[in-house]
Image: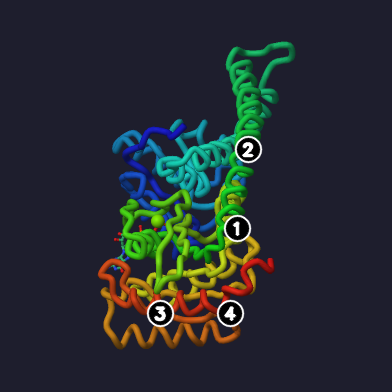
């Protein structure tokens, strides 16, 4: 299902989203794309997204630099994508498609693979519908070209594939829910590691559990949840690593991943990991987004532990200041039980975190079966 990796790429962002250029570049690099030019546009054209004079300069890059892919880092209408594709004759992705590509390269489990395929079909269908609509408009009465038949057939195949995937996912979902129920009946306190992509969730999971799950600087290294039991002072806790959050998650992906994230909703203690080596604005934005995402998947009122990770990259003074900043941001959240600075990579303050989890788990023990 994954498309081949493209080489030379042009990245286009609306000027008002200029602050996301780093995020866009990081995501493109995750796929191994080589960005030869980044272009900011003032106002998208309603029919082609890109204004005419800009598309002329892109055409030049296609001819002279072998550019094969254009990424429009925005929400783009199917009409704009199809028109521009016909105009430039290269592949064009919007932001959703870029994220979907990364997901499809990283999807490991069967469930994740199916969820991504479903999301891709849902993203592709409006494009195909638009293509068919335009083809119909331009045809002479009574004339149906072979291209039109092929695309109609492709559309029907996608629709039936979509139905099949939905049925298979439903079965897998039931299996997952049974698994979660069984675990709960065994009485484990369940802890979910959550947070923005690349915050260090899997690194902390590995440090806590002694596992060796892949980690990496690129976005969305982890696409499936994994759980493992740990023992803290005689108490058995079950720890789960989860899929990372990102701002403005495309709707296709939200639907696909809420099933996986449902695991978080069933846990007893939530850890939110933040990359403390980033600047204060990023820390606050990403923490805020993590809290919102948790709310959106139905997590409210559970004990939260905020972990400020990667402190090996910053000074002691910075750590103190960032703790104060996060504390004042969270002053109205009375379910925040602790804010702990750690280095998941170097193992700093892991004992402190384990003790804190143990302490919270003890307070929960009697309440476990009440919900
Ligand atoms: N210096 C430093 N780097 C860290 C620390 N924790 C994680 N990293 C690095 O940060 C990058 C992301 O770590 P991961 O554990 O893959 O992050 P994640 O949150 O699981 O990311 P996704 O699964 O992609 O959402 C990796 O390159 C890690 O080596 C830390 O405490 N210190
Ligand atoms: Mg991970």
Kindly report which numbered mark, 4 or 1, lies closer to the viewer in this rendering.
Answer: 1
The answer to whether residue 51 shows anywhere in this view is: no
Q: Mark 2 points at which residue?
A: 171
Query: Label 4 to label 1, Cα distance in Å?
Result: 25 Å
Q: Nearer the viewer, residue 92 or 325?
A: 325
Are there few (<14), some (14-19), or many (20+) residues within 10 Å of tag 1? few
325 left or right, relative to 344: right
- Dot 1 or dot 2, earlier in sequence: 2
Q: Nearer the viewer, residue 13 or 177?
A: 177
| Residue 29, horizontal then vertical, whole percent | 34, 50
Are there few (<14), some (14-19), or many (20+) residues within 10 Å of tag 2? few
In the rendered view, tell whether residue 2 sits above or below residue 29. Answer: above
- Dot 4 or dot 1, earlier in sequence: 1
Residue placed at 33% from the left, 33% from the top? 63
Are there few (<14), some (14-19), or many (20+) residues within 10 Å of tag 4? few
Question: Which mark identifies residue 340?
Answer: 3
Q: Name the residue under label 1.
A: 185
Residue placed at 59% from the left, 12% from the top? 146
Are there few (<14), some (14-19), or many (20+) residues within 10 Å of tag 3? some
Tag 4–tag 2 contact (CB < 8 Å): no
Query: Label 1 to label 3, Cα distance in Å?
Result: 30 Å
In the rendered view, tell whether residue 133 sits above or below residue 359. Answer: above
- Dot 4 or dot 2, earlier in sequence: 2
**Callout 2: helix, strand or loop?**
helix
Residue placed at 57% from the left, 73% from the top? 365
Kindly report which numbered mark, 1 or 3, lies closer to the viewer in this rendering.
Answer: 1
Question: Which mark identifies residue 335?
Answer: 4
**Callout 1: helix, strand or loop?**
helix
């Amino acid at each position: 299902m994954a498309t081949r990796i493209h080489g030379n790429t042009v990245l286009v962002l609306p000027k008002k989203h200029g602050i996301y250029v780093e995020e866009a570049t990081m995501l493109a690099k995750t796929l191994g794309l080589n960005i030869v030019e980044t272009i900011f546009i003032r106002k998208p054209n309603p029919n082609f997204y890109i204004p005419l004079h800009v598309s002329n300069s892109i055409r030049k890059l296609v001819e002279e630099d072998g550019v094969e892919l254009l990424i429009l880092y925005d929400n783009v209408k199917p009409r704009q994508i199809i028109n521009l594709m016909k105009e430039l004759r290269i592949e064009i992705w919007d932001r959703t498609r870029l994220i979907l590509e990364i997901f499809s390269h990283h999807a490991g489990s069967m469930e994740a693979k199916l969820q991504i395929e479903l999301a891709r079909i849902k993203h592709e269908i409006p494009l195909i519908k638009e293509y068919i609509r335009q083809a119909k408009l331009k045809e002479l009465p009574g004339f149906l070209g072979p291209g039109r038949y092929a695309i109609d057939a492709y559309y029907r195949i996608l629709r039936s594939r979509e139905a099949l995937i939905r049925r298979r996912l439903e079965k897998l979902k039931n299996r997952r829910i049974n698994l979660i129920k069984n675990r709960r009946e065994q009485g484990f306190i369940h802890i979910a590691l959550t947070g923005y992509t690349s915050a260090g969730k899997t690194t902390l999971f590995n440090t806590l559990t002694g596992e060796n799950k892949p980690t990496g600087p690129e976005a969305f290294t982890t696409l499936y949840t994994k759980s493992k039991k740990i023992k803290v002072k005689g108490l058995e806790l079950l720890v789960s690593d989860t899929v990372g959050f990102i701002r403005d998650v495309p709707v296709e992906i939200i639907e696909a991943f809420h099933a996986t994230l449902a695991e978080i909703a069933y846990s007893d203690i939530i850890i939110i990991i933040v990359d403390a080596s980033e600047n204060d604005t990023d820390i606050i934005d990403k923490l805020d987004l993590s809290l919102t995402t948790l709310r959106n998947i139905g997590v409210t009122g559970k004990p939260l532990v905020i972990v400020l990770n990667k402190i090996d990259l910053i000074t002691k003074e910075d750590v103190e200041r960032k703790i104060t900043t996060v504390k004042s941001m969270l002053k109205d959240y009375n379910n925040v039980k602790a804010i702990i600075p750690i280095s998941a990579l170097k193992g700093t303050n892991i004992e402190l975190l384990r003790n804190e989890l143990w302490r919270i788990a003890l307070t929960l023990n009697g309440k476990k079966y009440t919900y």
